[in-house]
Image (cartoon, helix red, strand yellow):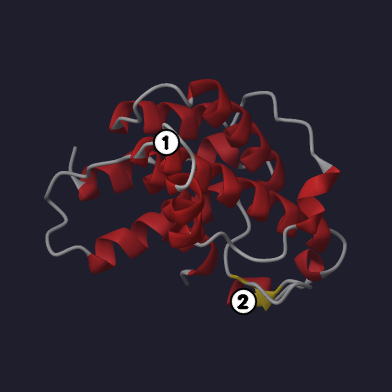
């Protein structure tokens, strides 16, 4: 599947309109953890992105509230590189889970505060100083994929995915206007 076809395949607007982003990400986290032993393919990625619109969410973990910075891919890679028997696929899944936990914690902290700002679509800073532009499942995925498209040389080339792709998609979606 090409970048362009994937972009058009993630249109979740009709599926996700009754699900806030925190709940969507909690459901996505649960699905990612269930599928973590699988190699992520484009089809599996599309399936979990869609299933997170209707799946049971993971229970919120108060320990995530301690997370105050977005995960750094290189730091996750260094940490995993020091563990025995870790692979690049392990690093990618750990990065994606770290992104999900970070974003869930941020949204949880902003509830009743910054998320109530009617001008939030112009960008807001969380209480931890992290910038956000997108606050629903559709826009975070659409803007994340738009970022991929804007920086790829040819949007008709194959969209190769790994578990790290999902974490990157979500982070780009958080900060891309």
The residue carrying pointer 2 sits among few (fewer than 14), some (14 to 19) or many (20 or more) residues within 10 Å by Cα, namely some
For residue 18, say whether it is visible.
Answer: no
Q: Quadrant of residue 6?
A: top left
Measuring from the top left, give residue 68's x and y in whole percent: 72, 65
Which residue lies at the image location 67% right of the left edge and 37% below the top edge?
A: 26
For residue 45, say whether it is visible.
Answer: yes
Which residue lies at the image location 63% right of the left edge and 24% below the top edge?
A: 55
Relative placement, left or right, of 116 versus 41 is right
Which residue lies at the image location 47% right of the left edge and 72% below the top edge?
A: 177
Find disc 2 in the rendering and name its residue: 123
Out of 173 and 74, give the one closest to the viewer. 74
Pointer 1 or 2: first along the chain? 1
**Figure check: 123 above or below 26:** below
Depth-wise, is mark 1 or mark 2 nearer the camera?
Answer: 1
* Image quadrant containing the N terminus: top left
Q: Quadrant of residue 92?
A: top left
The residue carrying pointer 1 sits among few (fewer than 14), some (14 to 19) or many (20 or more) residues within 10 Å by Cα, namely few
User: Which numbered disc covers residue 86?
Assistant: 1
Of helix, strand and loop, which one carries label 1? loop
**Figure check: 17 above or below 151:** above
Out of 118 and 57, give the one closest to the viewer. 57
Cα separation, mark 1 vs mark 2, equals 37 Å
Which residue lies at the image location 54% right of the left edge and 62% below the top edge?
A: 174
User: Which numbered disc covers residue 120?
Assistant: none
Measuring from the top left, give residue 51's x and y in whole percent: 53, 26
Out of 19 and 174, give the one closest to the viewer. 174
Of helix, strand and loop, which one carries label 2? loop
Measuring from the top left, give residue 175's x and y in whole percent: 52, 69
Measuring from the top left, give residue 91's x and y in whole percent: 43, 43
Relative placement, left or right, of 142 versus 100 is left
């Amino acid at each position: 599947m090409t970048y362009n076809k994937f972009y058009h395949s993630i249109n979740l607007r009709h599926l996700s309109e009754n699900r806030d982003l925190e709940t969507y990400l909690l459901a996505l986290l649960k699905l990612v953890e269930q599928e973590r032993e699988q190699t992520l393919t484009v089809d599996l990625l599309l399936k979990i992105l869609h299933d997170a619109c209707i799946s049971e969410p993971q229970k919120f973990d108060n320990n995530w509230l301690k997370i105050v910075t977005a995960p750094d891919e290189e730091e996750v890679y260094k940490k995993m590189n020091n563990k025995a028997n870790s692979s690049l696929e392990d690093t990618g899944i750990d990065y994606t889970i770290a992104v999900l936990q970070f974003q869930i914690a941020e949204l949880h902290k902003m509830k009743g505060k910054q998320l109530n700002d009617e001008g939030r679509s112009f960008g807001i800073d969380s209480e931890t100083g992290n910038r956000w532009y997108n606050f629903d499942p559709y826009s975070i995925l659409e803007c994340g994929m738009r970022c991929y498209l804007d920086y790829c040389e040819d949007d008709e080339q194959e969209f190769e995915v790994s578990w790290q792709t999902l974490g990157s998609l979500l982070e780009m979606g958080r900060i891309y206007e």
